[in-house]
Amino acid sequence: MKLSSLAVTAILFPAALSAATPLSETSDLIDNDAVPVISEASKARAAELVSQMTLDEKLSYIGGIDGFYIREIPRLGIPRIRMADGPQGVRNDTKSTMYPCGIAAAATWNRDLAFAYGKSLGTDARARGVHIMLGPGVNIYRFPKCGRNFEYYGEDPYLTSETAVQYIKGMQSVGVMSTIKHFCGNNQEYNRNNGSSDIDERTLNEIYLPAFRKAVQVARTGAVMSSYNLVNSVHMTENKALIKDLLRDAWGFEGIFMSDWTATYSSILAANNGLDLEMSWGQFMNPRILKTAVETGTVTEKTIDEKCQHILQTLIEFGFLDREQKDASLPEQNPDCDLTALNVAREAIVLLENEDSFLPFSKKIRKVAVLGPNSGNIPTGGGSGFVSPFTTVSVTEGVGGFYKLVADAAKADAVVYCAGFNSDTECEGRDRPFELPAGQIAEIDSIASLNPNLVVVVNAGGGVDFNPLLAKAKAVLMAWYPGQQGGRAVAEVLSGEVNPSGRLPITVEKRLEDNPVFNNYYCNTERLWNSPERVTYFEGVFVGYRGYDRAGTEPLFPFGYGLSYTDFQYSDIAAEKLSDGRVRVTASVKNIGKRAGAEVVQLYVNDEKARVPRPEKELKGYEKVYLEPGETKSVEFILDSEAFAFYDMDLHRFTVEPGIFNILVGASSRDIRLTTAVTL
Ligand code: BGC
């Protein structure tokens, strides 16, 4: 790949303003190592089946049935296809492993764990005969209040993409189709059915679309689910520019494009503009309505055939017409999956504060009181991502495995207070406050006055107001929603059995007003009497740390931040241009403390001079490195053109401008330890 010959998949926007044509060049930003998702043989077999279907059969086929199924056509040997939520466990009609939530998976910054997560979840699906899993969710974290942030992977498109790609590859490696969702612009739960996310072309391409593009082009996801909202005035189930021109024509997606559950708002528009499958049922796309449309030529039969073709060729490619999906040899309660849930939780926990190295607990700490609303249960976010586990380990139970349990705060050597939200207070369908639920802060204050050896564990899907906790607690852990083994993982971190290695996939603000999206989160553009409510993303690409850097605002905890029980020293950065145009960066990291631990070495790129405003730095590489005390390892990053490109609104594609690019390597977005530069 030559940087000079950069030609990138792109889409022209705003869709509402132009009937623009996407560029037809194939992306060279994508490492196309994966095999195409649909073989010619599967396509031919699907075409043969479609040719045998009656019009009524075809029109019924493109609407789901019984909540979570694609209907069967026994006379053609087409089986019933089962779907289930969702990103953090198999939800529907079953108990199953409850994994840590999505943002926890991202907080591990560990690609192998993301793969294992997807694979274990796929294994749970196979044990139950589920063909299609409704996840991962990859909408970008814009603001802490969004009720579904817990399902997603944080504020950065690169970290989100890397996590999603591994998750999908893992899941599909065991014969379960993944569904990337919600395409796109679903960054708030508030008014999600009727709000238009107005996002300019550059911002869409740089921030909100990359994870979907890589899910399609690198991980080869079998399915994509629409969002509920409109994007630039057009509902996503009828958004031709994004479905047909971008997803299909520019990105080459050959799988199933399904609606979110009752996210279809029209028949003719949805049918003609690219929706393949209306879920959960054919309210708008059904024989009663569409037969007349076909007879009158408003919708062509060829269009209906294409939808059936997309669905069938994908089902055939995944083997669903030729084998039983349920693998009876797999246990429904699977110890391997339980271990994956534990391993993800262990690496997801972020140690935010550790005054005077209070953690891990010293040998003097023997009696621990575990208090607070989330101490005796394992909280999770709510809505379609909710999972019913077979078993859980609460923090009380986990700590009980290491320390004596005492009920009274004043008599304990230390107190662990479990604060945060739960499935009632942080969930799909509505947004949540930035402040912790009422009463928790008052309780923390009174406990701190009885016992200063206070640790607060927070369960949330994103940032909260940490200031009152920091004022009282010696240590603060962000545990997210850590899944069924969460209490054990927290206890292992408290005791030092596990050295924390989670890093924030978000920026945490000192005050909510500091967030670059603060003025743009709710409807912020005047609304005409008959138009949808509008949320205009005026901050553009400057979301998360990109916005803090531009404003020069100090965050409370920066993106990429997290403490460890050991220290790491960085040295020896070098960058060289390779003959294929890529750039190789190496750096060394040494564990200079007394405990083994893992560091997340983060690489950011800064474009020294550009003709458009660019973020001061953007994450373009990371590696998690495990080091014994005294051990040094060299870390290598290979940067392709994507690491240096921005989306050019004039050319309607990504471009790399020649010039100097600074390479920043460090322990967080605000803790850069090494720099070098390359000239391209
Ligand atoms: C959610 C989807 C989910 C679907 C099925 C919808 O409410 O937005 O993410 O997959 O329900 O449960």
Image (cartoon, rainbow, N blue to C red):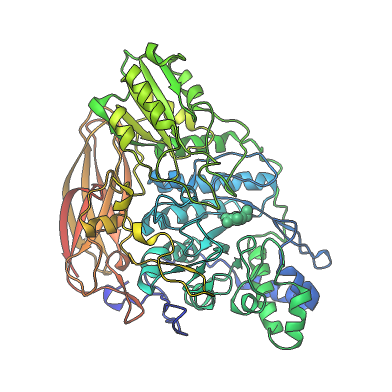
| Residue at 30%, 70% in the rendered image | 646
Quadrant of ligand 1: it is: bottom right
Q: Is residue 176 visible?
A: no
Q: Residue furthest top?
A: 411
Horizontal placement of 277 versus 619: left or right?
right
Which image quarter: residue 548? bottom left
285 to 453, vertically: above or below: below
Q: Nearer the viewer, residue 574 or 84?
A: 84
Tell me residue 462's x, y (percent): 41, 46
Which image quarter: residue 525? bottom left
| Quadrant where the image shows the C terminus | bottom left
Q: Residue furthest right?
A: 75
| Quadrant where the image shows the N terminus | bottom left
Q: Is residue 423 visible?
A: yes
Tell me residue 316's x, y (percent): 67, 65
40 to 116, vertically: above or below: below
Tell me residue 622's x, y (percent): 31, 51
Q: Nearer the viewer, residue 622 or 511?
A: 511
Tell me residue 101's x, y (percent): 49, 44
